[in-house]
Amino acid sequence: MTDKKDVLQPSLWTPRPVDETIAVYADWADRYHAEVTERGYQTPDRLAAALTKFAALDTEILDFGCGTGIGGAALRKVGFRTIDGTDVTRQMLDQVADRSIYRKTWHASPADMGFAAGSYPVIVAVGVISLGAAPPETLAPLIDMMPEHGLLAMSYNDPTLADQSYADALDAVCDAGLAEVIFREHGPHLDDVGMGSDVIILRHT
């Protein structure tokens, strides 16, 4: 079993500039998949199962911040078939290149998501908009990329739930009438540290 001291240190869940976050994940890329899987990463499977209640299995899905493909694999496991992936970390995308999960992948940047608004009826962002990863300001622009009545399936882990800025970002898009929460459920996130997460599905209004 991987020593907890070696990965996922508390410093992971702290605010940092985007370029530093990209560097953290670039350095972690070759170990990330094995380490988080070994530690009991439950949120991708929970999110994928929840999404089956609201989206047809033949829906085109964008796995935004796809990393090494853990979320995409969870989507495939429950029956979704047409999944594309994008990430801001090239090293993460290199890890998923030969895993036959995605129809296509591309490297995005914080300034350019790399797809046209309205292209995907469902966007998945599992663990992406969270403390130590994408900042809360990512949420509103991502919703702007969704078509009318499109779905955004995302998650907030416990450290993110404890950071008021992320709660405020979610409240802001809902209060502004940009989206509505159609599903929200707390459950296990990382088993070996007893961390939980909220799986949240938003519908663009």
Image: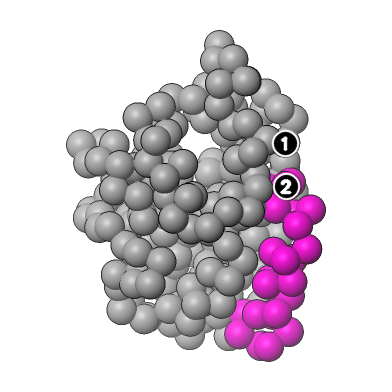
Rendered location of residue 36, percent (x, y): 52, 30
- Is mark 2 in CB contact (under 8 Å) with mark 1? yes
Say the numbered circle drawn on residue 159. Answer: 2
Which numbered disc flags the more N-terminal residue, 2 or 1?
2
Q: Quadrant of residue 10?
A: top right
Classed neighbour count for the residue bearing mark 1: other residues with Cα under 10 Å, few (<14), some (14–19), many (≥20): some
Q: Quadrant of residue 8?
A: top right
Q: Is residue 141 left or right of residue 199?
A: left
Viewer-closest of 3 and 126: 3
The residue that label 1 is drawn on is 195
Write the residue at 48% across / 58% down.
18
Write the residue at 72% across / 41% down.
196
Viewer-closest of 69 and 106: 106
Q: Amino acid at mark 1?
A: Met
Q: Amino acid at mark 2?
A: Pro
The magenta segment is: 157-179
Q: Is residue 31 above or below residue 176?
A: above
Which is more foreground, mark 2 or mark 1?
2
Rendered location of residue 155, percent (x, y): 61, 54
